[in-house]
């Protein structure tokens, strides 16, 4: 507006005064338009920021689907070990998360995976569950490649408990059954007893029929984890996997969940990711990962005596007591 006034005055000084009322009308109109113009700019920025998400959704809906090849062999029972042989893994177009990993999870043993964030612990779990395919090397189950087995027969041998259990708006019994049919109230209660959850469930006025609310709002964090453990052991799996199941709990809840883990782990093969020293030191074998490689492995005492990376994690309090 200032520039327009200067141009108008310089071009015709004689009529400048008579043009001021018209100029005032345009000025008021412009001032009234400014909020709408600014809103157009904000809307443009919102649309631009949403474009990345819209593009991801579009590719998810219409992009090619990677098909998981199902094997031909039905796994009757897990008998020996899960072995990683020269395993390498990387997401497409990214650096390797795992490089030349050789490790073994033996039947009937409790194996703990430790290491700093980004070392590859959860990636190993996802590979065992078949969520990722190795870039190189192979995973052997009882001496045969994991890809040779039918996926359902392999996953049917595994119970999984994550750091953030999903509890939905339904009864405690329904959350333990988790849409699986054919389980009697007695079998659900037995699973809850193994998970150290039967006590607090029976304290509810409606017991196993208690509606826990959205995201389990009526349950504490420790109670939610014990319901998740009961869900995992309901099928009586041969292998149990715990992915940092106690990391976000307070001391009392952690102790109760730890007792549930110990009970559920009896006579089973257990793989556990944890940052609690009380959980790790009880493992039969501890595997220390660093930058996608196996740095060292052994028992708690053996690794302390080596004074290597595990010793550094313990003494620096990177592993919680």
Image (cartoon, rainbow, N blue to C red):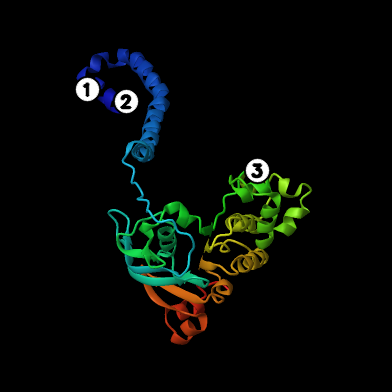
Few, some or many residues within 10 Å of mark 3 (<14, 14–19, 20+):
some
Q: Nearer the viewer, mark 2 or mark 3?
A: 3
Residue drawn 36% across and 58% down? 148
Image height check: is 1 above or below 263?
above
Image position of 159 (left or right of 141): right
Rounded to the nearest angstrom, the CA distance separating label 1 from label 2 is 14 Å
Residue 223 found in image quarter: bottom right
Image position of 28 (left or right of 4): right
- On the image, the x and y values in percent for residue 53 come to 38, 40
Image height check: is 148 above or below 42?
below
Rounded to the nearest angstrom, the CA distance separating label 3 from label 1 is 78 Å
Q: Which mark is residue 1?
A: 2
Q: Which mark is residue 10?
A: 1
Residue drawn 34% across and 43% down? 65
Q: Nearer the viewer, mark 1 or mark 2?
A: 2
- On the image, the x and y values in percent for residue 321 come to 58, 74
Residue drawn 53% across and 75% down? 283
Residue linked to disc 3: 170
């Amino acid at each position: 507006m200032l520039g327009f006034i200067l141009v108008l005055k310089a071009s015709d000084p004689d009529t400048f005064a008579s043009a001021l009322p018209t100029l005032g009308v345009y000025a008021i109109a412009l001032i009234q338009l400014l909020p709408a113009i600014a809103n157009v700019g904000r809307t443009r920025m919102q649309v631009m920021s949403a474009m990345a998400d819209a593009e991801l959704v579009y590719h998810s809906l219409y992009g090619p689907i990677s098909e998981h090849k199902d094997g031909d062999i039905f796994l009757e029972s897990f008998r020996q070990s899960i072995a990683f042989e020269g395993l390498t893994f990387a997401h497409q177009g990214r650096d390797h998360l795992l490089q030349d990993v050789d490790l073994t999870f033996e039947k009937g043993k409790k194996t703990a995976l430790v290491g700093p964030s980004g070392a590859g612990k959860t990636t190993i779990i996802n590979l065992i569950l078949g969520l990722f395919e190795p870039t190189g090397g192979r995973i052997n189950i009882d001496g045969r490649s994991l890809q040779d087995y039918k996926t359902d027969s392999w996953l049917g041998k595994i119970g999984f408990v994550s750091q953030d259990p999903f509890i939905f708006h339904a009864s405690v019994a329904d959350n333990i059954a988790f849409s699986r049919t054919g389980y009697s109230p007695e079998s659900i209660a037995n699973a809850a007893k193994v998970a150290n959850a039967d006590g607090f469930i029976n304290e509810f006025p409606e017991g196993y029929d208690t509606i826990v609310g959205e995201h389990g709002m009526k349950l504490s964090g420790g109670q939610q984890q014990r319901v998740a453990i009961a869900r995992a052991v309901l099928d009586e799996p041969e292998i149990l996997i715990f992915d940092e199941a106690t990391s976000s709990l307070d001391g009392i809840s952690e102790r109760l969940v730890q007792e549930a883990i110990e009970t559920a782990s009896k006579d089973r093969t257990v793989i556990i990711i944890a940052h609690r020293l009380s959980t790790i030191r009880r493992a039969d074998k501890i595997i220390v990962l660093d930058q996608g490689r196996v740095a060292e492995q052994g028992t708690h005492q053996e690794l302390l005596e080596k004074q290597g990376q595990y010793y550094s994690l313990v003494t620096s309090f990177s592993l919680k007591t």
